[in-house]
Image: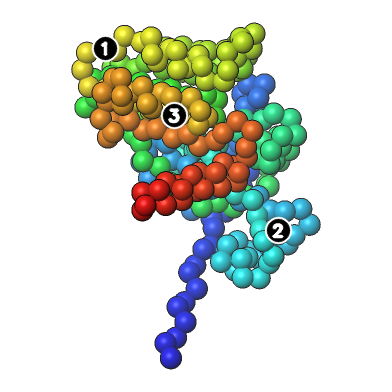
């Protein structure tokens, strides 16, 4: 009889809160000490943060393999995906920006209450996008959930690079300052348009400059899908020149959205097999 396969090591990495800052009314910046973080060189690098359930004690270092083997599923930590805003190799400071809407969600309230010394465990980073020095110009589009990645991309643009940036936020109080690049801010407050409509309209109305464009479109899945379709079908962009990700859906948390995507993919595979 063959020996059972060894259990896969799923030990997570540890980050300790160093300080926090509310940079806009609904955006909280948390700076961690993350000695084990390895920068992968992308500007959209993200981590999977793990938030433990209240009243549950977890073994340290946190190992999801052990947890899944020893605890019922309702006691497993909740995972949420967040873009790394910056990482300083010299100081090991890992910065993550959290959108905060009161008691809604898990990560936002956690960030609002975070104190120096608090610990969070994480996996990663992942990521695949980095502004291409060879591009003639760059198109960056997203909502506030994509703003950390857009900010990181802006700061990694080659010197003198041309960029068109559209960001949708609630109102002018949620705007952030970026050097060397002008951002067109689209406000939802006071508008009858649906979420993302302003971004779609801005991209569709844009007169594209001549030359090769590299595009980055991230945020709520509804508008991301519409802009993706426009860029591929109407503008004729090649797939390898567009980083596109609809990583959340209005009315669903990350778990619900991931489940919906998995269900849709399964139906598409089944249809393709018929």
Q: Are marks 2 and 1 in contact (CB under 8 Å)?
A: no
Q: Residues within 10 Å of mark 1 (few under 14, many from 20)?
A: few
Q: CA distance from mark 2 to mark 1?
A: 52 Å
Where 269 sits versus 93, above or below? below
Give how far across and how far down residue 168 sits, in percent.
Answer: 53, 18
Label number found at residue 93:
none
Which badge, 2 or 1, comes first in the chain's sequence?
2
- Classify mark 3: residues with Cα within 10 Å, few (<14), some (14-19) or many (20+): some
- Marks 3, 2: nearer the viewer: 3
Q: Secondary structure at mark 1?
A: loop
Q: Position of residue 42 (x, y in %)?
A: 37, 39
Q: Residue visible at 31% across and 24% down? A: 233
Q: Nearer the viewer, residue 252 or 185?
A: 252
On the image, numbered disc 3 is attached to which residue?
Answer: 225
Which image quadrant is residue 89 in? Answer: top left
Horizontal side of 164 relative to 172 (left or right) equals left
As helix, strand or loop, the secondary structure at mark 2 comes to helix
Q: Mark 2 highlights which residue?
A: 74
Q: Kindly identify the residue that appears in the image at 57 percent across and 20 percent down.
A: 195
Indicate which disc, 3 or 1, sits on the residue closer to the N terminus.
Answer: 1
């Amino acid at each position: 009889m063959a020996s059972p396969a060894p259990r896969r090591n799923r030990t997570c990495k540890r980050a300790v809160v160093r300080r926090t800052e509310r940079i806009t009314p609904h955006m909280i910046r948390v700076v961690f000490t993350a000695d084990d973080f390895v920068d992968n060189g992308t500007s959209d690098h993200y981590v999977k943060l793990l938030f433990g359930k209240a009243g549950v004690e977890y073994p340290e270092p946190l190992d999801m393999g052990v947890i899944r083997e020893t605890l019922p599923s309702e006691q497993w930590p909740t995972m949420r995906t967040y873009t790394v805003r910056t990482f300083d190799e010299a100081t090991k400071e890992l910065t993550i920006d959290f959108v905060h809407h009161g008691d809604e969600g898990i990560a936002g309230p956690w960030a609002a209450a975070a104190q120096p010394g608090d610990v969070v465990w994480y996996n990663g980073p992942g990521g695949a996008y980095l502004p291409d020095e060879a591009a003639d110009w760059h198109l960056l589009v997203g909502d506030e959930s994509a703003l950390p990645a857009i900010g990181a991309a802006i700061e990694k643009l080659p010197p003198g690079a041309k960029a068109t940036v559209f960001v949708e936020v609630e109102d002018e109080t949620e705007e952030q300052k970026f050097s060397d690049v002008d951002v067109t801010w689209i406000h939802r407050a006071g508008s009858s348009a649906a979420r993302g409509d302003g971004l779609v309209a801005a991209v569709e109305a844009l007169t594209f400059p001549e030359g090769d464009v590299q595009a980055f479109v991230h945020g709520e899945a509804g508008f991301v899908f519409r802009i993706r379709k426009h860029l591929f079908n109407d503008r004729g962009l090649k797939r390898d020149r567009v980083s596109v990700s609809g990583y959340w859906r209005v009315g669903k948390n990350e778990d619900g959205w991931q489940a919906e995507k998995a269900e849709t993919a399964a139906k598409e595979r089944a249809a393709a097999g018929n």
